[in-house]
Image: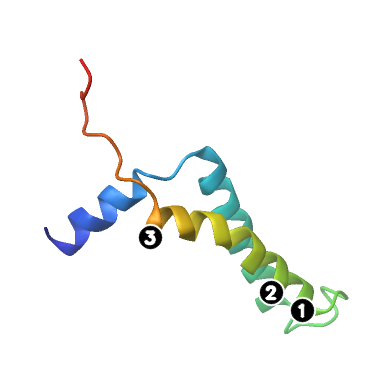
Amino acid sequence: MSFWADMDERAHRLGILDTKLSQAAAILVACAVIKAAPRIVTVNAWWFIGLAALCAIKPLRTFYFGKKAPAAGAGR
């Protein structure tokens, strides 16, 4: 199986919760990067990093260790 086919199969395992948690993790990482300009954000960057890691746990677990997605049209 090619690399892209394997990644596509893994991506099909992700549900709506996994997708939204991944988006939240990406936004929080962006906030941590923005923290480089202290006038924009006055919150400690470690909060963003911690929240990003927390949001990323379930999607990463599903992506790497979840069950394989059923084949398209299976069960018909």
Reading the chain from its start, which is encountered first: label 3 or label 1? 1
Amino acid carrying label 1: it is Ala
Mark 2 belongs to which amino acid? Ile
* Placement of 10 over or under 49, stated as above or below: above
Could you tell me which quadrant the N terminus lies in? bottom left
Residue 37's x, y, as percent? 76, 82
* Residue 5 falls left or right of residue 26: left
Query: Secondary structure beneath disc 2?
Result: helix
Front-most of 18 and 33? 18
Figure colour scheme: rainbow
Badge 1 density bin: few <14, some 14–19, many ≥20, Cα 10 Å: some
Residue at image position (21%, 59%) is 4
When the figure is inspected, residue 37 is found, relative to residue 75, above or below; the finding is: below
Mark 3 against mark 1, which lies toward the viewer? 3
Residue drawn at x 63%, y 59% is 55
Q: Which residue is mark 2?
A: 49
Vertical order, 34 against 67 (above or below):
below
Residue to which mark 1 is pinned: 45
Image: 76 above or below 58: above
Q: Which residue has dot 3 on it?
A: 64
Residue 15 in picture, x, y percent from top left: 47, 40
Q: Which of marks 2 and 3 precedes in the sequence?
A: 2
The residue closer to the viewer here, 20 or 53, is 53
Q: Secondary structure at mark 3?
A: helix
Q: Residue at x 19, y 54 (%)?
A: 5
Label 3 to label 1: alpha-carbon separation: 28 Å
Is mark 1 in CB contact (under 8 Å) with mark 2? yes
Question: Residue 65: where, in percent of width, then height?
Answer: 39, 57
Q: Amino acid at mark 3?
A: Tyr
